[in-house]
Image: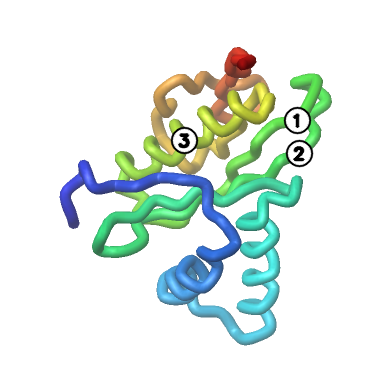
């Protein structure tokens, strides 16, 4: 594993599609029709067209993780929530997962999304800032960032 200080975490963009898709294929090869469907979903997330986003973690050695995030209405939380149900990365790589979740929290604050829900199977203990929600998911309240004019 490379130097942890070289971990770069950011929202993925459309230009990342080939690299992320190839990395996903090495982790879980799929038959052609399923691989095409996964690629379409990946491109929608990387395009950040309102369905969600994909947070990527990488070092100079290559990808370390991919956090697909769905943006969905949540009636109990009175608005939009980022829902995270899968982590593409080493399950033992808590550093990369924590860094992706921290970046997601910052993204939510900047975009006015107040809640992040994380599937309980992705982390045995609450990630930093998360608490157990009555739904059984880990929950982060992302207070929006103050707007600065000028």
Disc 3 crowd rating (10 Å Cα; few below 14, some 14-19, many 20+) is some
Instruction: Give the residue at mark 3.
Output: 103
Instruction: Give the residue at mark 1.
Output: 80
Q: Are marks 2 and 3 in contact (CB under 8 Å)?
A: no
Q: Which of 133 and 51 is in front in this view?
A: 51
Q: Which of 92 and 42 is in front in this view?
A: 42
At which x and y percent is residue 67? 51, 49
Residue 143 visible, this orientation: no
Residue sitting farthest toward the front = 150
Which residue appears at 60% of the width and 30% of the height?
108
Mark sitting earlier along the chain (1/2): 2
Residue 134 visible, this orientation: yes
Q: Residue 141 sits in which quadrant?
A: top right
Label 2: state its secondary structure.
strand
In the image, 91: left or right of 87? left
Label 3: state its secondary structure.
helix
Instruction: Give the residue at mark 2.
Output: 72
Q: Are marks 1 and 3 in contact (CB under 8 Å)?
A: no
Mark sitting earlier along the chain (2/3): 2
Q: How far apart are marks 1 and 2 (CA)?
A: 5 Å
Which residue appears at 40% of the width and 29% of the height?
125
Which residue appears at 50% of the width and 78% of the height?
29
At which x and y percent is residue 33? 69, 83
Of the 4 image quadrants, the one containing the C terminus is top right
16 in relation to 137, above or below: below
Disc 2 crowd rating (10 Å Cα; few below 14, some 14-19, many 20+) is some
Q: Distance between the residues labelled 2 and 3?
A: 18 Å
Of the 4 image quadrants, the one containing the N terminus is bottom left
Which residue appears at 63% of the width and 71% of the height?
39
């Amino acid at each position: 594993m490379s130097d942890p200080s070289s971990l770069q975490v950011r929202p993925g963009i459309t230009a990342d599609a080939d690299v992320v898709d190839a990395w996903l294929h090495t982790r879980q090869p799929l038959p052609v029709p399923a691989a095409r469907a996964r690629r379409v979903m990946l491109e929608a997330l990387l395009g950040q067209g309102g369905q969600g986003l994909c947070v990527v973690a990488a070092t100079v050695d290559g990808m370390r993780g991919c956090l697909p995030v769905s943006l969905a209405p949540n009636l109990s939380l009175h608005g939009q929530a980022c829902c995270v149900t899968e982590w593409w990365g080493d399950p033992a790589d808590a550093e990369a997962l924590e860094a992706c979740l921290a970046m997601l929290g910052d993204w939510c604050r900047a975009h006015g999304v107040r809640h992040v829900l994380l599937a309980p199977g992705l982390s045995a203990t609450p990630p930093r800032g998360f608490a157990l929600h009555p739904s059984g998911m880990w929950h982060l309240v992302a207070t929006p960032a103050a707007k600065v004019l000028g």
